[in-house]
Amino acid sequence: MWHPLEQCLYWLDIPMGKLFRFDPASGKHERVYEAGEAIGGFTVQADGSLLLFMARGAIKTWRAGQVTTIIAEIPEERHTRFNDVVADPAGRVYGGTMATADRPGRLYRVDLDGSLTVMLDAVGIPNGMDFTLDLTRMYFTDSASRAIYLFGWDDGALYRYTPSGEVDQRIEFPARKVSSVVFGGPDYRDLYVTTAGGDNKPVEGPGAGALFRLRPGIQGRPPFLSRIRL
């Protein structure tokens, strides 16, 4: 995720619980936090801190090495984890947990006062949440059922779709699995792309487990900042 206040990119090694930061101005890349358990996603708070969504449904804040627990766990999510989150225009946060063998995943909303509301109760692998340009609708992807995107996870490419659902652009990568994308940079024309499978490069490709930066000629927009009162 692009941090608009710091002008830096943050990203995760989800299963290892590692948080990284890249400063494009200096070229400095560093690991800034290691949780010891999975971190599924995060948002940037209005005060610049990061709101981390983790294993067991835990929610914590991180800033300059200081970690504060907001929710130690959600009892129903004790055997799973958050997988993706997004802040909405009002500063609330939507976060999805993954399904287990015993029960489906859920989509939660964290309101400004920190309270939780279950929005969806039959989710496989929540992913790819964002909002339409007019901010009237929210995109939500269930990767397990491919409810929105119908192309293969291991296609090794990034696609741009028109609002009518047609493929407008395709960019290939030297890795089988493109895992996430985000716009950043001063003008939001830098596209940062991560790939998965870095622990098995012979199978997943030489660019697996990597971070790419490209200029596709498309301008993104700043991320919404969460405003959860802690």
Image (cartoon, grey):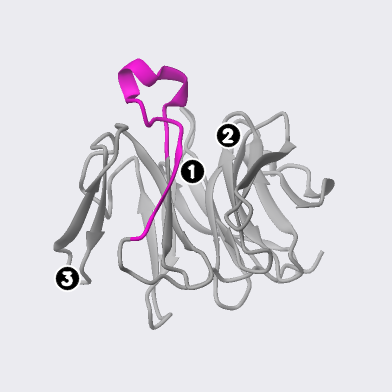
Can residue 209 be found in the magenta stretch? yes
Q: Residues within 10 Å of mark 1 (few under 14, many from 20)?
A: many
Q: Is residue 179 left or right of residue 169?
A: right
CB-based contact (under 8 Å), mark 1 and mark 3: no
**Whether residue 108 can be seen here:** no
Residue type highlighted by circle 2 = Thr
- Residue in the picture at 39% in, 59% down: 140
Task: Name the element at disc 2.
Answer: loop
Magenta region: which residues? 195-215
Q: Quadrant of the N terminus?
A: bottom right
Helix, strand or loop under label 3: loop
Image depth: mark 2 or mark 3 in front: 3
In the drawing, does residue 191 fall left or right of residue 147? right
Quadrant, the C terminus: bottom right
Res. 157 image quadrant: top left
SS under mark 1: strand
